[in-house]
């Protein structure tokens, strides 16, 4: 297995490790002691009216090359593991177009081992997710309630437009339609691509217009919660398997080893801010400030994620010297090994639990 080597460095050079990997506290990789999610204590706030069960809608958006199409395709594969930390889930397409997308992208990722083509045209998708958290650390028991409290149900609704459309809302009417679609959701997933930001330094341009328009729509409908949007937001720092991103996380001491030797970042919000400082001259710090200005802290959750996951050895553990899962063949990026989506379903479950619990995931 070989790591993908770009023609030019996308991040400032970092030291590589030539000796066999040994976990030690100096590297920031202490022994992992459990698989439960780590959350900062939420701040107090008075939640607004929440949608009832079966009416919850979650929207997804991101800038160019953020991996939105691949993320959506990987969701189907992520829910297939019955022993996953988020329980058992079923994904049901709402129409023929959504069904075709789900089936074709799963085949491209798992069988053909190629990435789906990025969005070029406006397309509308919807899937119904039905899950059961029973038997997991996220489940809970309330004997005085008759309804099963571990059952979750939501619609993932996406008006898929090219990521570049969010930069210029005045000349891209389909982007305005997508933003209106996002404004009416209860939960949002924002995909942030640190690799592209390190190169192009323009992520703020795609985020700023979107949130400004959503805030305007929510104010018109009297839905703002003080200065904040009413939504729960999951921020996914994507492509965590990329060597440029992962090496920096290790060098900064942000990684631990989780179950089966798979790396985890216990404090993804802290890592996001640290990386923003490390990418000096980028707009990543503005992105973080904008997100925190628009969403209440108890409704804002950060994740590191990868739609394809790390390259793994037999048994599922990760060789931290040869973890890349992408190779370039004839100028085309191809997936090297089996897919193991990393923090793809977790952001959605976190949003649902936050909405159910009035802010606390």
Image (cartoon, rainbow, N blue to C red):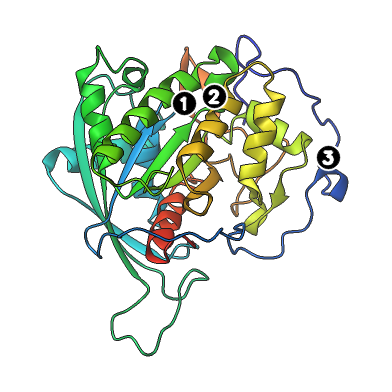
Residue under numbered circle 3: 20
Instruction: Report the Cα–Cα distance between label 1 and label 2.
Output: 5 Å
Local packing at callout 3 (Cα closer than 10 Å; few below 14, some 14-19, many 20+) is: few
Residue under numbered circle 2: 327
Which residue shows up at 37% across the image and 17% down it?
167
Residue under numbered circle 1: 334
Q: Is residue 292 left or right of residue 122?
A: right
Local packing at callout 1 (Cα closer than 10 Å; few below 14, some 14-19, many 20+) is: some
- Badge 3 element: loop
**Which of the two residues, 113 or 45, is positioned nearer the viewer here?**
45
The quadrant where residue 100 appears: top left
**Which of the two residues, 163 or 187, is positioned nearer the viewer here?**
187
Q: Relative to 246, does residue 136 appear above or below in the rendering?
A: below
Pick whichever of labels 1 and 2 is earlier in the sequence.
Answer: 2
Pick whichever of labels 1 and 3 is earlier in the sequence.
Answer: 3
Q: Are marks 1 and 2 in contact (CB under 8 Å)?
A: yes
**Which of the two residues, 13 or 48, is positioned nearer the viewer here?**
48
Q: Could you say where residue 65 lies in the image, as x and y percent from the top left?
A: 43, 23
Q: Could you say where residue 32 lies in the image, as x and y percent from the top left?
A: 72, 59
Q: Is residue 245 left or right of residue 56?
A: right
In the rendered picture of this protein, how many numbered marks are placed on residues? 3
């Amino acid at each position: 297995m070989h790591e993908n080597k770009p023609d030019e460095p996308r991040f400032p050079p970092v030291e590589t490790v030539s000796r066999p990997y040994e976990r030690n506290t100096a590297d920031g990789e202490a022994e992992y002691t459990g698989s439960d999610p780590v959350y900062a204590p939420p701040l107090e706030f008075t939640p607004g009216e929440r949608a009832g069960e079966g009416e919850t809608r979650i929207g997804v958006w991101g800038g160019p090359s953020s991996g939105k199409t691949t993320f959506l395709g990987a969701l189907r594969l992520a829910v297939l593991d019955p022993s996953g930390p988020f329980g058992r889930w079923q994904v049901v397409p709402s129409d023929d177009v959504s069904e075709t997308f789900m089936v074709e992208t799963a085949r491209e990722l798992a069988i053909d081992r190629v990435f789906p083509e990025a969005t070029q045209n406006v397309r509308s998708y919807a899937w119904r997710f039905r899950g059961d958290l029973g038997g997991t650390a996220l489940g809970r028991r309330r004997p005085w309630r008759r309804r099963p409290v571990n059952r979750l149900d939501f619609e993932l609704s996406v008006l898929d437009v090219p990521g570049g459309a969010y930069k210029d809302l005045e000349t891209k009417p389909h982007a305005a339609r997508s933003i209106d679609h996002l404004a009416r959701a209860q939960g949002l997933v924002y995909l942030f691509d640190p690799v592209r930001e390190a190169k192009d330094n323009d992520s703020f341009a795609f985020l700023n217009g979107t949130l400004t328009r959503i805030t305007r729509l929510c104010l018109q409908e009297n839905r703002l919660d003080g200065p904040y949007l009413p939504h729960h937001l999951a921020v996914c720092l994507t492509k965590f398997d990329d060597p440029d991103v992962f090496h920096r996380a290790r060098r900064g001491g942000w990684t631990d080893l989780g179950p089966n030797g798979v790396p985890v970042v216990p404090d993804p919000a802290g890592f996001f801010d640290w990386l923003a400082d490390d990418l000096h001259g980028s707009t990543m710090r503005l992105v973080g400030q904008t997100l925190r200005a628009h969403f209440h802290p108890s409704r804002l959750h950060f994740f590191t994620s990868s739609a394809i996951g790390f390259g793994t050895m037999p048994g599922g553990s990760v060789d931290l010297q040869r973890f890349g899962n992408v190779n370039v063949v004839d100028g085309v990026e191809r997936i090297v090994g089996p897919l193991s989506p990393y923090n793809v379903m977790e952001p959605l479950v976190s949003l649902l639990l936050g909405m159910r619990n009035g802010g606390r995931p």
